[in-house]
Amino acid sequence: MARAKADERQFDLFVTYLTDLPLRDQRDTMERPFFSLAKSKRTVPIEYTVGDVWVRVSAPANIGMATIYDADVLIWAASQINEAKARGLQHSPRLSFKPYDLLKAIHRGTSGIEYRRLRAALKRLVATVVETNIRADKGNRTAAFHWLERFDEKIDGDGNSDGMEITLPTWLYDGILEGRVLAITPAYFKITGGLSRWLYRVCRKHAGNQATGWSFTFRQLHLKSGSTQRFAEFARDLRRIVRADDLPEYHVEAYKGDRGDDCLSAVRRTLLAPGHPARDPELLQQVGKRRTRPRL
């Protein structure tokens, strides 16, 4: 009976109204290549396999693959659903909202061009096809879905948006209900670079609140990112991020591993020793002032 009620709820409309939400990101998507890291159109599919886990992402050439900037919509949706669940409120994978509210929540502008960019992002999320065996028992089950199953928009008599609706795939919605989400900082939305955004998510997933942080080789990160860059270019961009060291919450350093590999370590800034320059809380405030809003 409980399952029947849950299935019935899938068809309800969740009218969003919650604001100033604790942000939540999908844990399963934070360390693997589910999105294009570039702002330019990507049509080359992502093919990722490590051990028994694999991910494949593709999209029509005329639309292009959903980007890590487009994923802000999914973070917002996950945060809405997670908070509604925590408060005991009704929720469903079908969300109705005012685009103005969504744009403000993900730190975007609200001009006409931002509305057009939002529509383009929603179309990419609908068009992108994801196939994976993540969350499958012993890797024997395959899930195939679009980041959004549907997108609808109401237009008023003046041709302006009067509201939008999106429908999340079951894979994403079930993950939220199962608690497969992690808290992220609102400063994430101010990160302008695609690789920097992806690296923050990896650090949040793996380094978390561990006192010793986490380490990766550059090669591992290149594979996990799904980047179309050659390794040498990817490594060059990683070193730029290390030199800037302005990721929210996490301090990153590069070093040589025991085998001579280039490696990156990440640790939460608040866990650094007192007096460490990267522990300075004013650093993030200065970074926030320098950033501009990234485009969808």
Image (spheres, grey):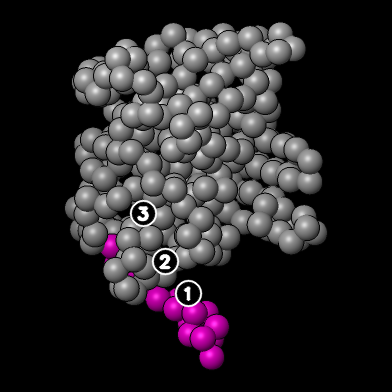
Q: Which residue lies under the disc numbered 2?
A: 94
Is 2 placed left or right of 285 in the picture? right
Tell me the number on the disc at residue 10: 1
Q: Residue furthest front?
A: 274
In front of the other: 79 or 117: 79
What kind of residue is marked 1? Answer: Gln
Residue 289 quadrant: top left
Q: Which residues are magenta?
A: 1-16
Q: Are marks 2 and 1 in contact (CB under 8 Å)?
A: yes
Do labels 1 and 3 touch, CB within 8 Å? no
Label 2 vs 3, first from the N-terminus: 3
- The answer to whether one can see residue 22 in this image is yes
Q: Is residue 33 toward the left or the right of residue 259 in the image?
A: left
User: In which quadrant of the rendered image does the C terminus lie?
Assistant: top left
Horizontal and vertical percent for residue 162?
24, 58
Asked if residue 9 is among those painted magenta in the image, a careful observer would answer: yes
Count residues near mark 2 (Cα–Cα under 10 Å), then give few for <14, some for 14-19, many for 20+.
many
